[in-house]
Amino acid sequence: MSTEAEQLESLAQQEYKYGFVTDIEADALPPGLNEDVVRIISQKKKEPAFMLEWRLKAYKRWLKMEEPKWPKVEYPEINFQDIIYYSAPKNTPKYNSLDEVDPQLLETYNKLGIPLEEQKMLAGVAVDAVFDSVSVATTFKEKLSEMGVIFCPISEALQKYPDLVKKYLGSVVPATDNFYAALNSAVFSDGSFVYVPKGVRCPMELSTYFRINAQNTGQFERTLIVADEGSYVSYLEGCTAPQRDENQLHAAVVELVALKGAEIKYSTVQNWYPGDDEGKGGIYNFVTKRGIAHENAKISWTQVETGSAITWKYPSVILKGDNSIGEFYSVAMTNKFQQADTGTKMIHIGKNTRSNIVSKGISAGRSNNSYRGLVKIMKSAENARNFSQCDSLLIGDKCGAHTFPYIEVNNTTGRVEHEATTSKIGEDQIFYCNQRGLDTEQAVSLIVNGYCKEVFRELPMEFAVEAQKLLSISLEGSVG
Amino acid sequence: MLQIKDLHASIEGKEILKGIDLEVKKGEVHAIMGPNGSGKSTLANILAGREEYEVTSGSISYLGEDLLELDPEERAHKGIFLAFQYPVEIPGVSNVYFLRTALNEVRKSQGLEELDAAQFLKLVRKKIDLVQLDKSLLNRAVNEGFSGGEKKRNEIFQMAVLEPKLAILDETDSGLDIDALRIVANGVNSLKSKDNATIVVTHYQRLLDYIVPDVVHVLFKGKIVKSGGKELALELESKGYDWLK
Ligand SMILES: Nc1ncnc2c1ncn2[C@@H]1O[C@H](COP(=O)(O)OP(=O)(O)OP(=O)(O)O)[C@@H](O)[C@H]1O
Ligand SMILES: [Mg+2]
């Protein structure tokens, strides 16, 4: 066990909370789930009546459903009655100044290039008046509202724009879609809502970072993004700083609706706590992400997954409209005892629909990394095209990489291409770098980042830089 | 600057170097020739610190230090450069980015300021002309899809940027056309100074028309069986290696 890995571990174990959420009076419900809990959640959030009905229906279906067993991941049984389904956000700063924060955590922040004021927020230090995050966010919101873009917590949207939410919520991922989606629908705490009006090109990347007053969305996050005809929006989810949460189970749902000619670009960097060196205590991340692309619309998912003990995640696109495009770019890195079963589904329904899949898996330590992808070409999808490339990179010989491509073609004009490679980082590549002056850790990080280039290219510039640094940090201690 | 004494080395239990003695002084150019499989690349790789080779006995001192105690990257920091017989591809990593990282690592180890992108580019412009490397290769991934000759030129380009004290060229001339050969040789010659030294591994004496060696060594079955002046290379060219057995 190298010191770097120990360092990383202790870094990852540092908790932090965003510190500026206020205004919810109640504390927490006791653990357990029943109909009353669902009612209380809806009531606490002052939701319209339809929402309660919707949640209850999901809850009743969930009771009859079973946890999926097909992913290639192993974990002890989850007792759903042990979970607390509602708790108010905690908002007291843990520290008065950065001096009190663990220096090793700060070092990680510095490695990631996080500005000082942001470090304070991340670490749970009281934020001083100079950096008024609220006013930054307010300016940001004003600019958006000028253009008619709605970007707010989904709980707020349910009160202000109930009709919009009602129309689209569950339209892509039905409340009863799968075990975790049903659970999420019944008890989701909060999340983001985005609406971009017809023909509007959203002038900035929408980042959860700026979604003030909606931190601590908890373990059941719900996001809904609607891009109206001919509009464009790029949305960034997550944060590269190591995140820990006392809730082990996370089951988010993200729905994207790209109407005629619209484009949605959704980028994620996921760095949840992966567990200790025996793999204990890490986050279980069971996410349902799906988008629907209408005529001439385009949806791109780009994800960089480095955290969580278990990741179970298949961002998908339903290519409903003619000429619609779906893309999936993914880097999934596992180390130590992490397990990831991730991939995508591209469902071609419309004519001339196109999908492109680039998946880069990296396994180190004793981890297991699986790609699972479905490409389905329906009878109606004349001239559909798919190209998939799934590469796996192994570091060391105790890890595993697996690829499960499922291809269903029901229209003879469809064309599906699948390429898969598995490689190991070569001794000669490392030696070549060593000979030029790079140490082995740098060499591995350089080689791995090069391997992921095609995916990083799809990320917004700043995010890409962060993602590269993150990958380097996640790799620390994986070699030598 | 470099003293190799009675060096024995093996790989996978098989002894390849069987007692090498070699001394290289500052300002000198040494050529090492010898038939395929005689151990030339093995020697070059051991100097650069490749771990697969096990040094079973003997010593190497470099600038007064025990070279065998140093990691490969430390050797690079101290000015050892190996132009690989088979340069390695690193997909997705741009050639300039790689080289800037390398140079900055070397500079850092010497307590020098790191160069930023703009400063580095200025340096690159100067050096690229030296080896007449196609500029489009700068932004391609390291050696990926490069032709054989382009890879070799790229090695010399890296050398020109890194300005090593001891450069070891392992068959850099193989696979080069006659013009490229001259360009590469010019590159090497223009970097020559009284403070650095070069070891050239080659099969062909024609390279030595351009890079004139002070000493020529013949490596045969893991031993240096003969050393001499430039004319030894000519002799080898006409007689082959049989007479040395
Ligand atoms: N990794 C290895 N595993 C097993 N044998 C090896 C390995 N590397 C080198 N050898 C053996 O060591 C011997 C010397 O090889 P080396 O590459 O040093 O020769 P060389 O003089 O450079 O030859 P050439 O002129 O063909 O480049 C050869 O017999 C070779 O097969
Ligand atoms: Mg050789």
Image (tube, grey):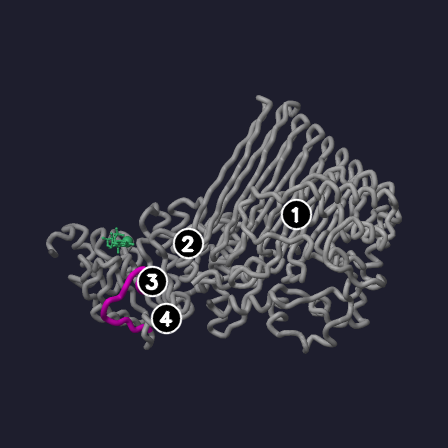
Residue at mark 2: chain: A
Q: Where does label 2 land, which residue?
A: A397
The type of residue carrying mark 2 is Asp
Marks 1 and 4, how far apart at CA: 48 Å
Left or right? Give the position of B113 relative to A48: left
The type of residue carrying mark 1 is Val
The verdict on residue B52 being magenta is yes
The verdict on residue A173 being magenta is no
Q: Are marks 4 and 3 in contact (CB under 8 Å)?
A: no
The quarter of the picture where residue A23 lies is bottom right
Left or right? Give the position of B197 relative to A322: left
The type of residue carrying mark 3 is Glu
Residue at mark 3: chain: B
**Which residue is the extreme one toward the top?**
A412
Quick one: quadrant of the C terminus of chain A? bottom left
Q: Give the percent coordinates (x, y) of residue A146.
A: 87, 49
Image: magenta residue range: B45-62
Instruction: Assign a secondary structure to mark 2.
Output: loop
Marks 4 and 2, how far apart at CA: 27 Å
Same-chain status of marks 4 and 3? yes
Instruction: Assign a secondary structure to mark 1.
Output: strand
Q: Where does label 3 land, which residue?
A: B51
Q: Where does label 1 land, which residue?
A: A287
Q: Which of these two is toward me, B41 or B234?
A: B41
Which marked residue is nearer to the observer: mark 1 or mark 3? Answer: 1
Left or right? Give the position of A354 relative to B77: right
User: Is residue A38 depicted above or below B191 in this figure?
Assistant: above
Q: Which of these two is toward me, A375 or A385?
A: A375
Left or right? Give the position of B173 relative to B112: left
Q: Where does label 4 land, which residue?
A: B70
